[in-house]
Image (tube, rainbow, N blue to C red):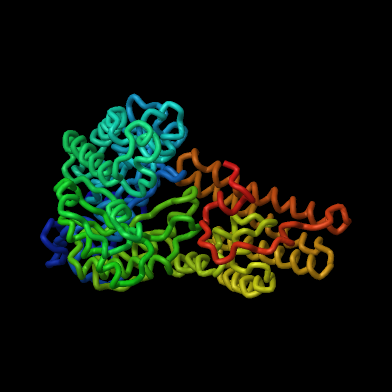
Amino acid sequence: KKAINELNNNNITFNSKFNDYVLSDKTYINGDVLYYKNISEGLMLLNALNEDETITFNDSFKTFGTMLDLSRGAVYKVSYLKNLIRKQAIMGANEIWLYMEDVYEVEGYPFFGYLRGKYSKEELKEVVAYAEIFGITLVPAIQTLGHMEQFLKWHDSRFVKDQYHVLLAEDDRTYELIKAMFKTIREVFKTDRIHIGLDETFGLGFGRYYKENGYKHQYDIFLDHLERVNTLALEMGFKDVLIWSDMFYRISSKHESYYDPETEFSNELLARIPKNVGLVYWDYYNTNLELVTKMLKSHKKMGRKVIMASGTWTWVKFTYDKNQSDKTANIHIEASKAEGIDEFILTQWGDDGAYVDHETSLLGVYELGLKALTNNKPNAKAYENITNELYSDALLKTKLNDATINPQGLMWDDPLLGIYVNNYVGNDYQALLPNIKQYETIVEQLKANDELLFTYHIASANLYKLKARYTMLNNYFNKKPLIEAKPLFDEFKKHIKEIAVIFDNIWHDRNKLIGLEAIQSRFATQLVRADEMTYIMENYDSGKIEKIEAFEDEVGATNQLLSLKFIGLGYSMRPY
């Protein structure tokens, strides 16, 4: 009843009324009583009843939820966290992980989370209490070895640094830090579950550790560190300790690959993994059911609890990528059900500045929640009741990701260098034409709808960027005036300015102030570089510039696995 009242207070209402709501071993209706297995299932049923539909639950997962990335620039306001908790609860979530690398207070370490928008203990306690209303367990997902570069960049952290992003294992000062981290987490969160990270610890033992201790096999460093951190967690009252599982595979695989189901683990190694430690198999890429199934079987052979972490693709995206998520997460759900994996988490990463419109991810949570927990299909009106957004609009926003030349890579691409565009077309600028046509189609789908303005302006900016590049290259090699491309760059700038305003409004509404500067500077860079293109065009046409080297160079890098991150596309070199 508390959950229903809180939803009513936030303009989410249910038509069906019951005299009583009773906790049960399954969710169903008997007369004027709603029996519910957990609050989220009860809310899912109430929302379906709004549309005269019932829900058939399949009881495949005892835990279903998401992981919110709060460490890539966008640190959500408490109010926005509450918004997501409400909506995801009605979509079936009963657990949400808060991924926090350095965005929480740690006593004695003032530079931990300095200028990162870190949460106070009071803020986190408020969110934990709010989630309880909806029966959602908030789980701290932190890092205790790798992914600590934001903290380790400060001079005062040098004593606990192995590599630029990896803590120094086997140093007492490192474990004093981790103990202080655990102290904050223990004070704030009510669950006995904690995720201590330990993924992607590349270079472990080969930085400062090697200089101080000499060579020691990474496995031994990793397992000794795990044992020590787990002991600290147990001492602080945590019982259910989770880690990402990839490093076991990366170190042991003959191919140095995570997704190698043929990896063999010795009994000696398995014995060193504490019994209370659960393994989180993360996979956002594999679409082969057989491979995913083999990976789950491989994890189960390790004799520890296994959790499947798939994803709603929000990272390095402007909008949720439904196509990529459907191709992967649906396979992961199917494999997990077949292998009896009863805990399933949808990660929502924010790599490269967390510039995604996070509300678009709710489409993925809704659709995949139905897939995981029920036998039902999506219902447009049910979705709209939760989100106050037309289901058709949500689907249209994902269309941006269907472009062959990725919209993020194209947006951050330098207009002169064309590092990302060249990766697709090389020196054949005529190959830009079908991509221009594709973006014209996307723009046509998005225009004339005020609810899609953010997506529309992104697609339009990219369209004019491609048109301007084609015109410049075509005119350059056919001895025609380059300045003919200037109106196209002017249109590009117009749409960039619109994007910047909308983006600022979204950020200010949902996130703390810190972090916005990273994305604002990128849009500003695009405007400055567009003006530079006008300078180049004018001076080339007048003869002051004899040739444009960026156009003359034979493209030597095509079909590369380029990162979509701005740092690799915005400059001719890595400036930092």
Picture coordinates of residue 527 (x, y %)?
68, 50
Left or right: residue 22 compared with residue 428: left
Quarter of the image for residue 407 reads bottom right
In this picture, is 3 found above or below 190?
below
Q: Residue furthest front?
A: 214
The answer to whether residue 89 shows anywhere in this view is no
In this picture, is 76 found above or below 314?
above
Front-lying residue, 75 or 266: 266
| Residue at (26, 70) in percent of width and height | 334
Q: Quadrant of the C terminus?
A: top right
| Residue at (84, 68) in percent of width and height | 479
| Residue at (16, 46) in percent of width and height | 274
In this picture, is 223 found above or below 433?
above
Left or right: residue 468 compared with residue 162: right
Left or right: residue 480 compared with residue 448: right
The answer to whether residue 536 shows anywhere in this view is yes
Front-lying residue, 32 or 223: 223
| Residue at (52, 53) in percent of width and height | 565
Q: Residue furthest right?
A: 542
Q: Residue furthest top?
A: 108
Picture coordinates of residue 311 (x, y %)?
36, 59
Picture coordinates of residue 263 (x, y %)?
26, 61
Count of numbered badges drawn on the protein:
0
Quarter of the image for residue 304 reads bottom left
Picture coordinates of residue 415 (x, y %)?
67, 57
